[in-house]
Image (cartoon, rainbow, N blue to C red):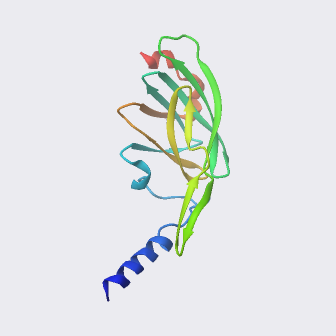
């Protein structure tokens, strides 16, 4: 087989073989795809089981996920800034929404017009859709520390104590 045909077949396999949308089907993968991380650390999160506690130079936040939306999820958070006694509370949503920018033969390029960042005060975490019930969180461990805890403990998390 000539080199030209081998390259064409490989490109077709990439286009149609591993690019299926998971939709709402369960995902059994245990590692975030490498193209998502770009040198970041990654953490799988199951929405109804997990709350996140994220800390960076600005303070600490507890984040819990609420309800799934189309290709995303809503969340709420509590944030405590360094040196402060009053917590800030808020809510948000993250989701994917792709728009085709260009297409040529079997190839196309899509941009995410969604909102792929979890924001809790000045803390920002990259979010990547996995399926209806879970996602990948990616972050730089040199800038942000993340721990997971039971979602039922969200209100009990003592941010002042954790900040010390």
Viewer-proximal residue among 45 and 59: 59
Q: In x, y percent, where is residue 81?
A: 51, 17
Q: In x, y percent, where is residue 132?
A: 61, 52
Q: In x, y percent, where is residue 110?
A: 56, 59
Viewer-proximal residue among 144 and 97: 97
- Name of the residue lying farthest toward the bottom: 1
Viewer-proximal residue among 161 and 98: 98
In the picture, residue 25 is in which quadrant? bottom right
How many marks are shown on the rendered structure?
0
What residue is rendered at 44% in x and 51% in y?
36
Side (left or right) of 141 relative to 21:
left
Image: 15 above or below 43: below
What residue is rendered at 42% in x and 44% in y?
42
Viewer-proximal residue among 49 and 133: 133
Where the C terminus falls, by quadrant?
top left
Side (left or right) of 27 relative to 40:
right
Where the N terminus falls, by quadrant?
bottom left
Q: In x, y percent, where is residue 16?
A: 50, 73
Image: 144 above or below 3: above
């Amino acid at each position: 087989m000539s080199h030209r045909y081998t390259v064409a077949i490989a490109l077709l396999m990439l286009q149609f073989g591993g690019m299926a949308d998971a939709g709402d089907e369960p995902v059994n993968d245990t590692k975030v795809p490498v193209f998502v991380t770009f040198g970041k650390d990654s953490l799988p999160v199951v929405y109804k089981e997990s709350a996140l506690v994220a800390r960076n130079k600005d303070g600490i936040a507890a984040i819990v996920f609420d309800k799934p939306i189309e290709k995303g999820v809503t969340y709420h958070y509590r944030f405590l800034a360094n040196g402060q006694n009053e917590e800030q509370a808020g809510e948000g949503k993250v989701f994917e929404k792709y728009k085709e920018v260009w297409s040529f033969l079997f190839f196309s390029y899509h941009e995410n017009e969604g909102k792929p960042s979890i924001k809790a005060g000045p803390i920002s975490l990259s979010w990547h859709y996995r399926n209806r019930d879970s996602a990948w969180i990616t972050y730089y461990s040199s800038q942000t520390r993340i721990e997971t805890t039971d979602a039922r403990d969200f209100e009990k998390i003592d941010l002042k104590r954790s900040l010390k």
